């Protein structure tokens, strides 16, 4: 049975200096890497004869507008079906350089996940075969999951604060 400690130590040794911030929230091994290391790391874990972390569960984005230089995160959830072991890998990007390599060569399912992340967050997956909007209309000139817009419409007159617990 794989342990978080065993896998974390092995990854830290193999990718010396390219991985950091090992955590275990709710027992899920979580680590951070760079855009240059993400594809080699995913490929290594997928092809490892023991770990076999070969199932891409999800790719998503997160917007942290207050984190200067790390405003966006691309988050990969990967799973070993053989070992029933899950891992979360994060890559932080600055708002002025939202490029990261595509994982479509490793996982066919990354195609749609990367398109969704591009659509909602504007993260550009370099080398993606068809990086176009998937859920929003092509004419949209913004990415709706970014925290750049007010949560409420200040012009509405029909809202009564008492109904919203204020």
Image (cartoon, grey):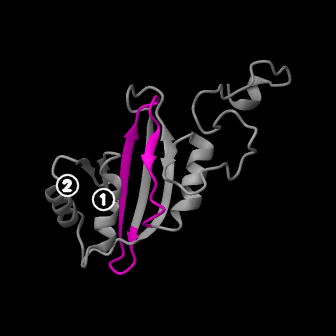
The secondary element bearing badge 1 is classed as: helix
Residue visible at 60% across and 39% down in the picture: 145
Labels 1, 2: front one:
1
Q: Which residue is mark 2?
A: 15
Q: Which residues are magenta?
A: 79-106
Q: How many numbered marks have been drawn onto this rendered protein structure?
A: 2
Q: Is residue 12 left or right of residue 52?
A: left
Q: Is residue 131 above or below residue 151?
A: below
Q: Residues within 10 Å of mark 1 (few under 14, many from 20)?
A: some
Q: Is residue 92 visible?
A: yes
Nearest the viewer among 147 and 165 is 147
Nearest the viewer among 30 and 112 is 112
Q: Quadrant of the N terminus?
A: bottom left
Residue visible at 45% across and 41% down in the picture: 99
User: Image quadrant of residue 112?
Assistant: bottom right
The disc, 1 or 2, on the residue closer to the chain's N-terminal end is 2
């Amino acid at each position: 049975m794989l342990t978080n400690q065993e896998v974390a130590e092995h990854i830290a040794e193999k990718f010396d200096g390219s991985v950091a911030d090992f955590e275990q929230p709710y027992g899920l091994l979580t680590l951070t890497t760079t855009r240059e290391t993400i594809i080699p790391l995913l490929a290594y874990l997928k092809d490892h004869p023991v770990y076999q972390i070969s199932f891409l569960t999800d790719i998503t984005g997160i917007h942290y507008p207050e984190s200067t230089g790390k405003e966006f995160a691309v988050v990969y959830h990967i799973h070993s079906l053989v070992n029933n072991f899950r891992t979360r890998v994060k890559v932080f990007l600055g708002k002025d350089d939202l490029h990261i390599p595509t994982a479509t060569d490793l996982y066919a399912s990354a195609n749609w996940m990367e398109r969704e992340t591009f659509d909602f967050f504007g993260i550009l997956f370099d080398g993606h075969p068809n990086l176009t909007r998937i859920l929003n209309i092509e004419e949209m000139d913004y990415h709706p999951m970014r925290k750049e817009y007010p949560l409420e419409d200040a012009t509405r007159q029909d809202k009564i604060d008492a109904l919203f617990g204020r």
